[in-house]
Amino acid sequence: MVVGLDAAPTSLDPRTASDASSALILGLVHRGLTGTGASGEPEPDLAASWESPDPTTYRFFLTPAVFQSGEPVTAADVVATYRSLALPALQARQDDALEVVGEVVAEDERTVRFTLRQPSAAFLHATRLAILPQGCAAQSDCRTGAGPFRLARIGLDSVELAAAPSAEPRPEVPGILFVVSPDSVSRALGLARGSIDLVQNAVEPDLLPWLREAGLEVVATPGSTFHYLGINLRRADLADDRVRRAIAHAIDRDAIIEYVLAGHARPANELFPPGHWAHADVRAHDYDPERARRLLAEARPGPIHVTLKTSTVELRRRVGEVIASMLAAVGIDAEIRPLEWATLYGDVRRGAFDVFALAWVGIEEPDHYHALLHSSMTPPRGSNRGQYAEARIDALTLAGRTVPGRGERAAIYREVAEIVQRDLPFVPLWWVDNVVVKNRDLLGFEPSPSGDLRSLARARWAVQRGPEAS
Amino acid sequence: MTPETAPATNATARPYPRRRSWRLVAGACALLALVATALLAPVLAPYDPLRQDLAHHLEPPSRLHPLGTDRLGRDVLSRLLFGARLSLVVGAAAVTGALALGLLLGTVAGYGGRTSDELVMRVTDVLLAFPGILLAIALAAVLGPSARNVVIALTVMGWPAYARLTRAEVRAAATRESTRAAEALGATPLRVALRHLLPSARPALVVQATFGVAGAIVAEASLSFLGLGPPPPTPSWGAMLAEGRSFLLVAPHLVIAPAAALGVTVLAIQLLGDALRAGRSSAA
Amino acid sequence: MLRYLTFRLALAIPTLAGVLILVALLLHLVPGDPIDVMLGEGASGADREQLRVAAGLDRPPWRQLVDFSLGVAQGDLGRSIVGGQPVGELLRERYPATLELAGAALLVAVAIALPLGALAALRPGALADRLSLGLAAVQTALPTFCLGPLLVLAFAVELPWFPVAGRRGPSSVVLPALTLGLGMSAVLARQLRTALIAALKLDCVRTARAKGVAPGRVFLRHALPNAATATLTVLGLQLGGLLAGAIVTETIFSWPGLGRLLIQAIGARDYPLVQGCVLAVAVTYVLVNLATDLLQAAIDPRLRERA
């Protein structure tokens, strides 16, 4: 089975991988203590269950599982993995929430105890970190995991996975070949020819009908990737919340979703989509150009000129052009600046922007609001790039980290979402669906809301394929 | 074509062959038509090239839109007409700059003695081995994206080619009898260069330049995509090509239109260039 | 001859130095920090500093360049910031692919341009001439990023003769080489035609014809060498451009060459890797130049006295 990627993975060690391609591959090779469920809540993976006798102690009980090397997964491996994050040679990218971990101890073969320096509601989500065998964890490039597939061969532009004999249950396909195909037209042609069997979220929406005609199947499920407009609140005219509300009312999101995204997105008014436990269902800023013009007239007399910075990805530029034209229709003169990624990212972090269009991928834990909105979390510390400062938000995001109960946390983050709706430090746009284009003969694959490919472990071919095709 | 053969053949000069004049006329007419349409774009274009109509995107050619609509529902014909302005100007400016600079430095290198030759050659080597993409990114980041920066980038990256061509031809021409004779007779280096060296470089340079114009227009496409170049939604043929190719499989008209325009331009310039090159010689 | 070679190779050093300095200058001028790009959000300040030191980014830019150059002199090209692999290893993996594509594309270009250009020159205004003109127009109007998918659609999807992308097996180089080579052949054919037309009018050629020398011999021994100068220069230029300039073709066909590596490295601001790639390209370019100059001197004895 061949899966097409749009970019090469940057790392095959789960502790240092941060890009989408690496995540897709490593999701099949590794398992963590917990995984992420459909509603965004942690669910058991290598840990069959856990308990938290007090807010700073967590105890995990491991299921019987085996690494691809044949060794059983023990508590010692868990300890070694978490300790290895501090290895200087490794340069690990760890979840912020793991900073509060004070001590990790193996209580017995199957039990691990974490002691936190302070209570952290976000900690549990961070335990999806992949568990590595002890000896391997001490190295700076560990590739052995406990997942259903093992890394078999690494090529220049491909990564081959083979079904791990230790996996329980054994995958039905003998292996998966991930190939890097950086050009979107080339990927579509590869799908049409049959040299690629599956591509996720990397096909132009307008090519989907052509691909259907070529005999492929398109499966779309609601996703959580959140697209938004970031706004620089330091700019005089953008600091006025009437202007920001005008921006929100000027954008016809339904039209963009229908005509530019081929219907594969849902309008968003907050960070988390329906179905996620932290979804707050706040009121939308409807498409209302008249209202936008009125708000602008109230706020200031003259025309407003802003630059809208986007990445150079074709789809993003196009969306940016449409948004700019919609803003122009209400009197905001927006100039699009597509920028190469490193330049864009650098500008965004430095605050050298008026408005930018970006997305958050794979955010499941509402503690992210802290990094996003807390007044102290401006870059380089955090992601509050617009320099938003609101005392109530500061208090709420801090409270949300320590309050343990799910219900109480949901209430806290509901209030956060409502303040965001009122203040619009960023303008929410939509959540894109996960769109998978696949070979009709590939059965048993179900897209997951978080965008991983784990169900490939249960996929199988409709027609028995010969030994030369995997 | 070279001076020493001119006397031998002028005596048997034939009447101006009809074939050559056909090229000159065709090329010149086509080019004039292109320039005219570019200038008259506001009058000729049926729609505002920036006007989006999302509901009617990627439509094939029809009565309403003779060349169809693009990804955002904009009229392709209008964008083509307006795009001519930017593309032709960028193409001409980039090539003119590169040609002028390259001609000058190439002659100096080929005729000016060992040190200047090595110096110029090292500089061209450095520029030719250098990844132009980086220069483009740097210019965009530091000076901001615009058409002017495209011209700067293309000029800087383009002149070494012309310099090398000039140098090669000038070196060969410098060893010819007629050149030596002129030098011996006391002609100034400038005169020697203008009358004996440069004419032999002309054919190669003309060919290079004709492709250079088209190349510049297409290079602008790649540069636009990197963020350098007139930012969207300003239409240009290069940008239309780059944008349209993503939809090659479902809307080929998006590529065919600018490609055809580009092809006609290249053809016109080639014909004109051919005629100019052949103009001073006595046989086609 | 040997003296000339050593002299030219010695001259290559300032060229390479010039390129490296220019690249370093621009890379550091451009906004964007490799650690930032690599980490994204979420890494604490301490992690960032640690990584910066580990990558040697705490040194001033000129110092980084000097250290890199010293390393090169000892054969060590440093390590990529993003993956940590030795740059030399990354280059070694990709260089053969670039050479293969460049060589194949050159073959295609010459195979098309030589006969076409020659025929066009021998019979100006006839079919071959018009064909070369038409080809030139079509080729330049259809850049590689359009031509590539068209060829793939025709010969890999509709007629499944070749693979869509990737470098696996000898047949996988055909479509990429065609895409690149066709574009090159247009300019080459026109240059050759023009140069030949001029060469055919030279005294020595007329004399040879008048003496009754066979036309083929006239062409090969008298006309072609005189036309070689400009044509070889153009060929040399195109070859140089092929090395890093095949970026678009490499991207479309997932060809694991230096061009793609370079562009990815620039995008990631991976300084050592960018410098390594540029060095590899520059060295090849210098060698190609040398070869072109030598070939020109071999064909045209008059050029030798300047050497």
Image (cartoon, coloured by chain):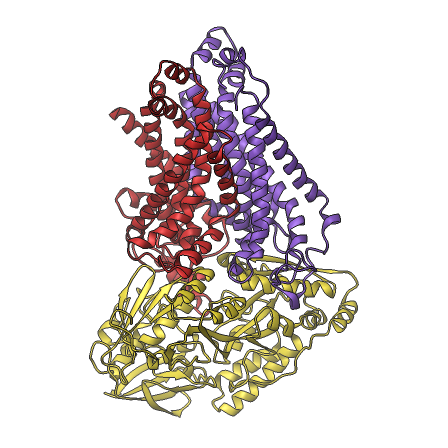
Chain colours: A yellow, B purple, C red
In which image quadrant can residue A153 be found?
bottom left
Residue located farthest toward the left when viewing the structure as drawn? A70
Q: Is residue C278 above or below residue B68?
A: above
Q: Is residue A311 above or below residue C15?
A: below
Left or right placement of residue C238 versus residue B199 in this view:
left
Residue B149: x, y in percent?
A: 58, 44
Residue B135: x, y in percent?
A: 49, 45
Residue C287: x, y in percent?
A: 32, 36
Q: Is residue A267 above or below residue A158?
A: below
Residue at 47% from the left image edge and 13% from the top image edge: B4
Quadrant assignment for the N terminus of chain C: top left
Q: Is residue C263 above or below residue A139?
A: above
Q: Which residue is nearer to you in this view: B264 or A341?
A: B264
In which image quadrant can residue A161 be found?
bottom left
Residue at 31% from the left image edge and 47% from the top image edge: C100
Residue located farthest toward the bottom when viewing the structure as drawn? A53
Quadrant assignment for the C terminus of chain C: top left
Residue A402: x, y in percent?
A: 48, 85
Decide if residue A339 is in sight here.
no
Residue at 60% from the left image edge and 81% from the top image edge: A417
Q: Which residue is nearer to you in this view: B120 or A452?
A: A452
In which image quadrant can residue A419 be found?
bottom right
Residue at 28% from the left image edge and 79% from the top image edge: A146
